[in-house]
Amino acid sequence: MASPSSAPSSADTAASPRSSSRNTIVIAFLLISTLYFADTLLRASLKTFWYDELVTVYLCKLPNFAATWSAVLHGGADLNPPLFYLLTRWSQYLFGEGLIATRLPEMLGLWLFGLCLYQFVARRLGPLRGAVAGLFPVFTLAHYYAYEARPHGIILGCFGLMMLCWQRAREGKNVYLWVVGLWLSYLAALLIHVYAVYLLIPFLIAEAISIAKRQRPHLGIVAALLLAPPCVIRLYLRLYGNFRSGGFTGMHIHLYELVQQYFVLVLGPALPLLLLLLLFLAWKGPAADTFSAHAGRLSLSADELALAFGLAVLPAIGVIGIKISHAYYFDRYFLAATAGYALLLAQVTLLRSGRAFVARNLFLSMIVLLSADTLVAAYCRWHHADLDQVEPSSHIIFVPSPANPLQRNPALLRDATKLDILVTDEPGYLYLYYYAPREIQSRLVFGAPRDDAFDSRFVDGYQRLARWGHADLRLTTYDEFFATHKDFLVYAPNNVAYRTGCNDCLDKFLKAGYSLRSVEEDPYNLLERFGK
């Protein structure tokens, strides 16, 4: 007969492994979160605002949200839905107009995205592979947009919630709660960025595959996905009308360009990780481990794999969308596809009889690489070393020290002529205006030829930002500028590779009767003096 103490002892023994497992998960979660925020905060503190972010800053520093939203609707300087500006204003209200504070919603967005991926995958494949999936976006282009004051990082957080609600709703427990959560998270995404309309497509693909397999679609999920877009249709039509009235013609991209640009830019940073994955798959490690007994039961469901497939092809679907809408195509608009690659990566680690050897070593490699990345950022932050960061779309190179944002513009800082400075670089003008000392700022003028449609659109955009964003920008056409200036300075990129403004400006100045008096060069620009 068992002693009275034997039953409690047995229960304690059974509970001990579960408690130990929970503690391990909590410790790993805290470690990963600490590394993520340390790396992201450091990189945010090392990166100055650029053109797109500065538009956000100017709109969100207006006295109240009504003024911000009126500037969007009437000014057309920026065309995002209202929730993005509201979240940014809240962050700036609480923490100030800083490099970190303004970008805090995006940092939290990517962190939430990774957390949701972990929960999604751990439900099927266990916490180790869930951690691999949750960490993967940090090794893609998505991490860059965790410290960019634009909607893309926040959108990823919303999409992570959509995935989690979709999975839980399909499991049949607390269905109404998860369906409402799916609808709310999708509606939030739609109120942050217009390209969120594409986010429903992978879910519809998964539901369509279920129908093809003669399974009933989940009507609650389908209803939640289809009822969210009508809630914003009037808003979207208004924003699209502003887009078209601004003279924007959109961008065109072919499928081969998609392969060349999207996968290289988005997955390029993860290449070392993918090479390590192949190495671990080929490695003849232990013949068995603690996961072997469960190998046959570990797998994402067919519906979840269908969702991963739909996400993987989302960028190609985006190409079709821009062909129809004549809108812009940027890789950052389709970063939700990284969720599909994360799911597939976690599934691939099940190869070779489902042993945990691959997943365990891949996870440890991720921790080592993220730690190294954080240490590099910390070294550059505290030793003022160069850590050049390049904007992926425009290829603008940011200075390594935001404390000295014009360190690569010494010619501009040394100038003592007091002459007006005509800036020909469109995005560069707003950067210089924001960071230049007041004495230089008051002399900066952005100009463009009247017959240049592209540059003229920038003049119009700056005029709207100046009017509705209450920015004291100086804008002109060349004819107007020539009529009032006998002597002036021109600040322009010194290399065609970095030139985004007028390419034949020198000829226009000479034809207008001006002579080139002097030239001073700094790392990326020329400061030229013209006079009659």
Image (cartoon, helix red, strand yellow):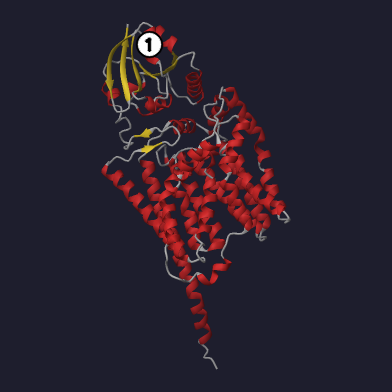
Q: Where, by quadrant of the figure, is residue 300 drawn?
A: bottom right
Pick whichever, 100 or 432, lies toward us.
Answer: 432
Q: Which quarter shows the N terminus?
A: bottom right
Q: Residue furthest bottom?
A: 1
Q: Position of residue 103 (x, y in %)?
A: 44, 41
- Give above or below for 8 relative to 143: below
In this rendering, the answer to whether 118 lies above or below 55 is: below
> Which residue corresponds to the image point at 51% horizontal and 52% vertical from the top-left?
342
Left or right: residue 508 compared with residue 176: left
Q: Residue at x 34, y 38 (%)?
A: 388
The x and y percentages for residue 171 are: 65, 60
The residue lying toward the viewer, choosing from 260 and 499, is 260
With respect to residue 295, does 184 lie above or below? above
Quick check: can you spot residue 368?
A: yes
Q: Give x and y (percent) for residue 301.
A: 61, 59
Residue found 65% across the figure and 48% down from its top: 205
- Which quadrant holds residue 411? top left
Give the left or right position of residue 18, taking residue 491 as reference.
right
Q: Nearer the viewer, residue 433 or 101?
A: 433
**Residue that numbered label 1 is attached to:** 509
Query: Which one is in front, 427 or 112?
Result: 427
Q: Amino acid at mark 1?
A: Phe
429 on left or right of 152: left
**Label 1: element kind:** helix
Spot occupied by residue 169 in the image (x, y as percentages of width and height) = 65, 56
Count the numbered circles shown.
1
Quadrant into which the C terminus falls:
top left
How would you rate the neighbour count of disc 1 (Cα within 10 Å): few for under 14, some for 14-19, many for 20 or more? some
Q: Is residue 190 visible?
A: no
